[in-house]
Image: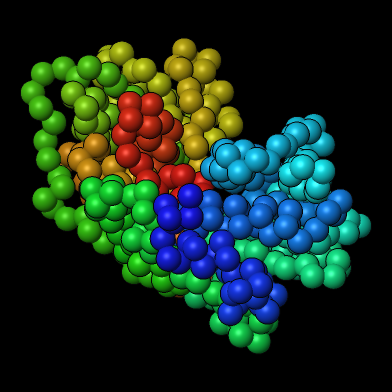
Amino acid sequence: MIAAFSPKQRRVLRWWGRASPDRGRDAIICDGAVRSGKTMCLGLSFALWAMGRFEKQQFALCGKTTESVRRNLLPSVLPVLEELGFTWEEKVSRNKLILRLGRRENTFYFFGGKDEGSAALIQGVTLAGVLLDEVALMPRSFVEQACARCSVTGAKFWFSCNPEGPGHWFYREWILKCEARNALHLRFFMEDNPALSQETMERYRRAFQGAFYRRFVLGEWTAAEGLIYDFFDDSMVREAPEGEAERWCISCDYGTVNPTSLGLWGKYGSVWYRVKEYYYDAREAKRQQTDQEYAQRLRALAGGREIEAVVADPSAASFLEVLRREGWKVRKAKNDVLSGIRVTADALKNGEIVICSPCADAIREFGSYCWDLSAGDHDKVKKQFDHAMDDIRYFVATVVEPEGRGAGGFFAGFVERPA
């Protein structure tokens, strides 16, 4: 079985072994590219180490949520452990897994580190080791509390993540200081995963652009800067085919003082075209419109077409209620900004969405939509020239991306945890 692993994966599997030159390390950090095989080999190594060194002890498996732990770690690790003769019992309601090999038994608890309040969840437990998957997505308070609970002699820390910005606390405090912390740091690339074909690797390389390419393909901790859609140019502006679309939708970013942007989308074959738009800037016009007036503008944009759904800003509660009362089928948009940007970039580059020339305000915003370089540790966009960008992002994340996944499409950027 070990022959199926790459040299770097084997090092992860063996780093704690008595014959390994890394055995004296207190921690291991695996970061780098997406789909590079780091999560599976780290999880497998953690289980083998725990069962080989301890008995009747407690361990923690941590992710952004307990569901992400189950989704990212268990499906890839448990079948391998089963082949090796391990048995397990999962107690879902108690978020724990009991792992057995012969008469030896240890307990693994699942914890989610999604926000600052999560640190309280792990207080009080005594651990012999902790694995923190997606550690860059967790607050520092949770990670430090999890490490502090590892008071059993011989305990070790295990970390995996995809890179974020160079100001991120984990990069500064653990990766840059790995020697001082006596941690083994291994940077993974897609080539370190023997399960990936060249075709698959090329597909992932095409899926990202800008800072996301440098992070998720090159494995670099790099800042997001400059234009967000820096690849967008006039060659991506085309007209919709002649004839009637197979389906119609409208996307909406609603503002009172800020601009409101509506986009009319028609699907021709496998491609969604943003054929027309309505864009209103209340500040520039020096007049705010009411919800009812915006509903009238939306109806005029629809132009009597049968609209499958209005995909709308989820925070626009009053406007959504007006639309429902008027008989529109409303879908609250998915509003994860970074994931939405990634899938929108993917859809644009793959030709799954097209912006048509009547959408002048959307085309203008593509040339001005930028990263906020003053945001510190976290990626943020400037809250300027983002209204058409938001309505397009809502549409792609809520309609295009789920349909693409259901049809076997490739949307590498959207996965909550792309390693």
| Residue occupying the far left of the picture | 242
Tell me: 314 left or right of 128: left
Across and down, in percent, residue 207 comes to: 30, 51
- Single out the residue that lies furthest toward the bottom: 180
Rendered position, 301 above or below 169? above
* Quarter assignment of residue 124: bottom right
Image spot of residue 354 (x, y percent): 21, 39
Relative to residue 145, is residue 266 depicted above or below?
A: above
**Nearer-the-camera pick, 217 or 164:** 217
Residue 218 visible somewhere in the drawing: yes
Can the viewer see residue 214? Answer: no
Asked whether, in this view, residue 211 is left or right of residue 180, the answer is left
Image-quadrant location for residue 328: top left
Residue occupying the point 28% across, 29% down: 265
Give the residue drawn at x 54%, y 74%: 185
Residue 161 placement (x, y as % from top left) = 54, 61
Residue lying at the far right in this picture: please name it.
Answer: 124
Q: Nearer the viewer, residue 219 or 169?
A: 219
Residue under the point 10% across and 27% down:
241
Q: What's the image's color scheme?
A: rainbow
When the figure is inspected, residue 262 is found, relative to residue 32, above or below; the finding is: above
Residue at 77% across / 42% down in the picture? 102
x and y percentages locating residue 63 in the rendered image: 65, 51
